[in-house]
Image (cartoon, grey):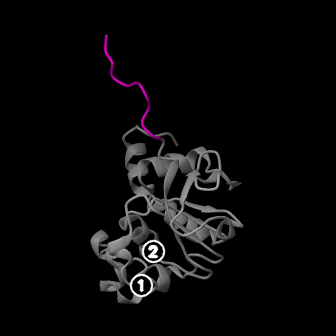
């Protein structure tokens, strides 16, 4: 008889990590990553370069302090405007997710296409502390402050969005779909 654990792997829809808290109107093109400073304006999308530049204008030592799995919490207008390198930089830096007061649908789509989940959760910046621990379940829309036990809600991801997230972004999803390994 095997004594191996039968517990399932954690769901990619659930993200848990330490909070990095930012204010309102953190632009995707100047706050998350300085788009104008990228070689060829980011056409090469080098993940190591994007990770090094993530939030460098706001927190100069961010790249050396961020840990894989950390979560960004931010205020209104996060990521507006943005080009694709902004969510790519967040993912490349090892950030697991962003939970924001507000953003636009273009940033949410670009982020999901890059395999990076963004939840819109009004009131989140007042509810959590920098350095605290947060858990976000994108399948149920449950956002939990682990330290205080407070629970907030956000709109859950649709099954199609979860499939793209689980695949690591739109291009990997399409590759799986064309290979017959993902649903439409």
**Relative to the observer, which residue lies in front, 180 or 106?**
106
Spatial CA distance of label 2 from label 1 is 8 Å
Main secondary structure found in the magenta portion:
loop
Q: Give x and y (percent) for residue 177.
A: 43, 44
For the residue pair 39 and 28, the one nearer the viewer reads as: 28
Q: Residue sitting at 43 percent across and 79 percent down?
A: 55
Query: Looking at the image, do the residues carrying marks 2 and 1 touch, with CB atoms under 8 Å apart?
Result: yes
Q: Is residue 39 above or below residue 134?
A: below
Q: Is residue 112 left or right of residue 155?
A: left
Splitting the image into 4 quarters, where does residue 3 fall? Answer: top left
Task: Identify the residue position indicated by label 1 in the image.
Answer: 35
Q: Which residues are magenta?
A: 1-10
Identify the mark at residue 13; answer none if there is no mark.
Answer: none
Look at 68% across and 54% down and name the residue there: 150
Q: Is residue 13 left or right of residue 76?
A: left
Q: Secondary structure under badge 2?
A: helix
Circle 1: element type: helix
Q: Mark 2 or mark 1: name the one nearer the start of the chain.
A: 1
Residue 53 or 159: which is nearer the viewer? 53
Q: Residues within 10 Å of mark 1 (few under 14, many from 20)?
A: many
Q: Residue furthest bottom?
A: 36
Question: Is 19 colored magenta in this rendering?
Answer: no
Q: Which residue has dot 2 on it?
A: 86
């Amino acid at each position: 008889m095997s004594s191996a654990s039968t517990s399932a792997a954690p769901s990619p829809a659930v993200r848990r990590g330490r909070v990095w808290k930012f204010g309102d109107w953190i632009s995707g093109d100047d706050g998350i990553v300085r788009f104008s400073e990228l070689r060829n304006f980011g056409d090469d999308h080098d993940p190591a370069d994007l990770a090094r530049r993530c939030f460098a204008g706001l927190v100069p030592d961010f790249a050396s302090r961020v840990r894989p799995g950390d979560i960004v919490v931010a205020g209104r207008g996060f990521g507006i405007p943005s080009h694709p390198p902004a969510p790519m930089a967040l993912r490349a830096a090892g950030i697991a997710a962003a939970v924001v007061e507000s953003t636009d649908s273009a940033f949410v789509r670009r982020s999901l296409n890059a395999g990076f989940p963004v939840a819109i959760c009004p009131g989140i910046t007042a509810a959590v502390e920098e350095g605290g621990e947060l858990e976000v379940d994108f399948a149920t829309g449950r956002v939990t402050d682990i330290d205080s036990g407070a629970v907030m809600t956000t709109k859950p991801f649709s099954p199609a969005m979860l499939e793209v997230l689980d695949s690591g972004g739109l291009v990997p999803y399409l590759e799986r779909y064309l290979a017959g390994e993902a649903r439409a």
